[in-house]
Image (cartoon, rainbow, N blue to C red):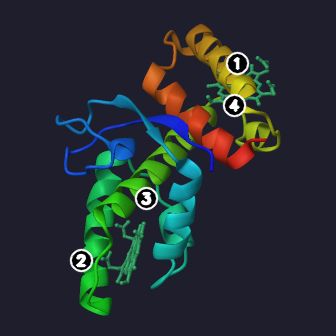
């Protein structure tokens, strides 16, 4: 199991410290250790029951947008199976999809996503690459990539293109 730090926000409604815990607005991001590998597994298991994974994988939403969708899917599950999606599982799915979309939106600005996805690197190497890309971003767009954005992207890359 690989636990990677990803910046997420929470509602304070989960007791497991791994998924905890920040009471505050959705756009307040804090560093929390999240197991993105597990999150991807949970996403694959629970989000393929009624439709293909292409449905969520083809959409781009921010964290608040995913929260709303997953909340609706929880209700769809209750209606159809008599049982909803647990809050920790909802949280993992939202984190996974938000990290994926952050990577896609940020790292497609100057070159194809196949550039990073065609490589495999360990965590330290991805951190270095993303830092360098942040400098490239500053040179081209005048702004570095914020820490939370970098952490989400590193987390996603360690999970999808790690070693
Ligand atoms: C119980 C069946 C069921 C499960 C389980 C389910 N879905 Fe859905 N999903 C639906 C139905 C029905 C629709 C179309 C109506 C709607 O949007 O609520 C839909 C539509 C969608 C859409 C398109 C609409 C939008 O808001 O963008 C997305 C994305 C989506 N689902 C993602 C997910 C994710 C992520 C999960 C896992 C948490 C999931 N679904 C699990 C039944 C389900
Ligand atoms: C502002 C433009 C820009 C953005 C945004 C950008 N890149 Fe790059 N990327 C470049 C340039 C220019 C190169 C070639 C020079 C270099 O490696 O710095 C490159 C090369 C790469 C390489 C090949 C070199 C290596 O180290 O393996 C990878 C992988 C990569 N980028 C990943 C990413 C990731 C991940 C992101 C999102 C965080 C990203 N890029 C965002 C401009 C950008």
Mark 1 highlights which residue?
128
Position of 72 with respect to 62 (left or right) is: left
The image's mark for residue 123 is: 4
Look at 31% across and 68% down and name the residue there: 86
Q: Looking at mark 1, is its residue's CB closer than 8 Å to ligand 2?
A: yes
Mark 3 highlights which residue?
93
Report if residue 47 is visible in the image: no
Furthest-right residue in this view: 119
The image's mark for residue 119 is: none
Q: Horizontal and vertical percent for residue 160?
A: 68, 48
Q: Horizontal and vertical percent for residue 59?
A: 47, 59
N-term mark: 3 or 1: 3
Cα distance in 3D space between marks 2 and 4:
37 Å
Depicted 140 relative to depicted 30: above or below: above
Eye-nearest disc, 2 or 4: 4
Position of 70 with respect to 112 (left or right) is: left
C-beta proximity under 8 Å, tags 3 and 2: no
Cα distance in 3D space between marks 3 and 1:
27 Å
Q: Looking at mark 2, is its residue's CB closer than 8 Å to ligand 1?
A: yes
Q: Secondary structure at mark 3?
A: helix
Furthest-front residue in this view: 16
Cα distance in 3D space between marks 3 and 4:
22 Å
Cα distance in 3D space between marks 2 and 1:
41 Å
N-term mark: 3 or 2: 2
Q: Horizontal and vertical percent for residue 22?
A: 24, 35
Q: Looking at mark 3, is its residue's CB closer than 8 Å to ligand 1?
A: yes
Quadrant location of residue 68? bottom left
C-beta proximity under 8 Å, tags 3 and 1: no
């Amino acid at each position: 199991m690989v636990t990677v730090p990803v910046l997420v926000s929470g509602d304070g409604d989960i007791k497991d410290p791994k998924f905890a815990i920040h009471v505050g607005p959705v756009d307040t991001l804090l560093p929390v250790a999240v197991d993105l590998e597990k999150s991807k597994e949970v996403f694959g298991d629970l989000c393929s029951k009624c439709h293909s994974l292409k449905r969520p994988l083809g959409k781009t939403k921010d964290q608040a947008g995913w929260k709303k969708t997953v909340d609706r899917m929880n209700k769809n599950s209750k209606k159809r199976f008599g049982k909803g999606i647990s809050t920790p599982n909802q949280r993992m799915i939202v984190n996974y999809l938000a990290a994926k979309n952050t990577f896609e939106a940020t790292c497609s600005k100057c070159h194809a996503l196949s550039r990073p996805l065609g490589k495999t690197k360990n965590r330290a190497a991805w951190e270095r690459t993303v830092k360098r890309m942040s400098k490239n971003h500053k040179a081209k767009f005048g702004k570095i990539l914020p820490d939370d954005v970098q952490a989400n992207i590193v987390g996603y890359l360690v999970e999808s293109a790690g070693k």
